[in-house]
Image (tube, helix red, strand yellow):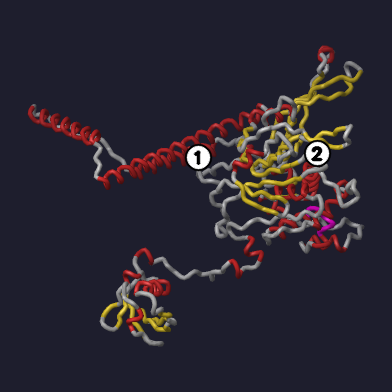
Amino acid sequence: MDPIPVIVKHQGKKYNVDLDPTSTGEVFKFQLYSLTGVEPDRQKILVKGGQLKDDTDLSKLGAKPGQTFMMMGTPGEGSAGLVRPKDAIKFVEDMTEAEAAQQVGATPAGLQNLGNTCYLNSTLQTLRSVPELQDQLAKYTPAPPGAGTSGNTLGDLSMFGLGGLGSSMDLTASLRDLYKQMSETQEGFPPLVFLNALRAAFPQFAEKAKSGNGYAQQDAEEAWSQIVAQLRQKLKMKDTSAPEGEPKEISFIDKYLAGGFSSITECDEPAAKEGGEEPIKGEDVFLKLDCHISGATNHLRDGILAGLEEKIEKTSPVLGRDAVYTKTSRISRLPKYLTVHFVRFFWKREAQKKAKIMRKVTFPHELDVVEFCTDELKKMLIPVRDKVREVRKDEEDIERARKRQKRIHDKAVADEAAGIVDSVSESKKADEKKEADKKKKDAKAKGEDTEMEDAVYKTDAEIDAERAAAVLEAKKELHALIHPELLKDDGANKSGLYELRGIVTHQGASADSGHYTSYVKKQGPLDLKTGKRGEEDGKWWWFNDDKVSEVDADKIDTLSGGGESHSALILLYRAIALPTAEGLAE
């Protein structure tokens, strides 16, 4: 039967409703609920012969097109806040490609392989996981041509964010445009303009394949290093933490991805020391930590420690000849984002190619680097790191207690419903009551005052609130422990603890062959109104050129190497988030 158009009057308003004769009164009431906000159980709909009941067969009403029904009732207290959304609801199929790409749960864009360019695709996807980099790139405008230079018309276009051919003259502008274009699609995007800019800036990436067909495969670590070096030179930002009198501009890379080494270099030969040769102290900047792999390397820590000690051959002024020196480095500044490079490739002379070290080297999801730091930096980091662990333990204890309370409560409810009585507990309660009554009776017989019990019983909710308040106070104490020097450097790690966020992997036996992919940890859903992200689900995106899929965290543990399968080549760690002065999450 076809729906019958009828009119429903409610509080002076008229609503056009399609009445379905094949349904019941309950369905009709839910239709009106969606229009008026009045719950079905609070509605009174007047029909011929009385009120419409939930089980009434609407075909028996004999409704005619245009017939008017009267409805009475007001929304309940819980529905008082129901209002029509200010913004019209838009379905995914009605959105533009760019709108759909920015929705919660949207799959990020992959990158098309343009002929042995997987090394570049994996590098770009991992760097894109740094939100501060995307924000700063969006503000980037190339410097105008210097005085006396004619400039380039196409190159000048990138100054205005026009992209295309103009940005191809500037690697940083090309990266800005590429990331913007990737944010507006869920399809595989061709990074052609950026690739051309990279090959123009660094001709090594334009090397042809030995077969003569297309371009040769390249090393992802070399692409990473060259791109970061170019960004370090071009991408500048205001330095709000700079002391008075010092430059107010700093490289983005120096602020967020560059660390500092303090080193001591001294001659290995005792004769040099006896001759009065003093150790040489130095300060260096590093953009990545190298994890050197030998037969004794089993874990990331082993390789990093090995990389902090280096043998150098140079002339000794005291001995008057070449001698071997040992350079020992310790970290004096930790960046917010720490890059770790597994040195898996070495030049194999007989094969004339970069061969791969297959050894399995495990790495953690959370990295503690305090032991690699200078004594001065350790003193700043250790109190914060230890407090972080203390707060985490408290939070875990609260969560365990909450789960235990829930189990006890659920069991008690189930037992009560089943009529089961815990005889031991009931007997104990009865004995305690008898003992208390006996004490009162004895005290009354002796003419003594009855002692009042001062026991205070708290509800589960009160106990939870006290625990939460204690944790909040501990988080405030944690923030207070951050050293003032570290607190003013918002591009630095303040605890010595890092969480893994991105990985570039390689599959194959040499750097010049095989296949590169990347893994990036999923971020929590973004609230567009507050700009804050929700809780993460622990899963990762796997970028295999233009193919993008979701994987569990367990997959990351399989990337330690041990064969020609996918093994980690570059790890990107981010400093763990610390609470604010109010004890809130960053």
Q: Which numbered tag is attached to residue 328?
A: none
Query: Which residue position holds label 1?
Result: 475
Residue nearer the viewer, 516 or 57: 57
Whether residue 15 is situated above or below residue 331 in the rendered picture:
below
* Left or right of 93, for residue 64: left
Classify residue 237 as left or right of residue 381: right
- Which amino acid lies under the numbered mark 1 shown in the image of this protein? Lys
Measuring from the top left, give residue 369's x and y in whole percent: 65, 32
Q: Is residue 537 above or below residue 14?
A: above
Q: Where is mark 2, residue-wise? A: 510
Q: Is residue 250 visible?
A: no
Disc 1 secondary structure class = helix
> Which segment is the magenta one?
167-172
Horizontal arrangement in the rendering, residue 181 relative to residue 429 (left or right):
right
Q: Are marks 2 and 1 in contact (CB under 8 Å)?
A: no
Which residue sits furthest front? 1
Residue 467 screen position, x and y as percent: 41, 40
Taking the image as shown, residue 111 lies to the left or right of residue 216, namely left
Say whether residue 103 is magenta: no
Task: Specify the amino acid type for callout 2.
Answer: Ser
The answer to whether any part of residue 277 appears in the image is yes
User: Residue 157's spot in the image, x, y percent?
Assistant: 82, 63
Q: CA distance from mark 2 to mark 1?
A: 48 Å
Which residue is rendered at x = 41% and y = 41% of the image? 403
Quadrant containing the N terminus in the rendered view:
bottom left
Neighbour tally class for label 1: few under 14, some 14-19, many 20 plus, Cα within 10 Å: many
Residue 405 in percent (x, y) is at 36, 41
Q: Quadrant of residue 372?
A: top right
On the image, which quarter does residue 407 sit in? Answer: top left
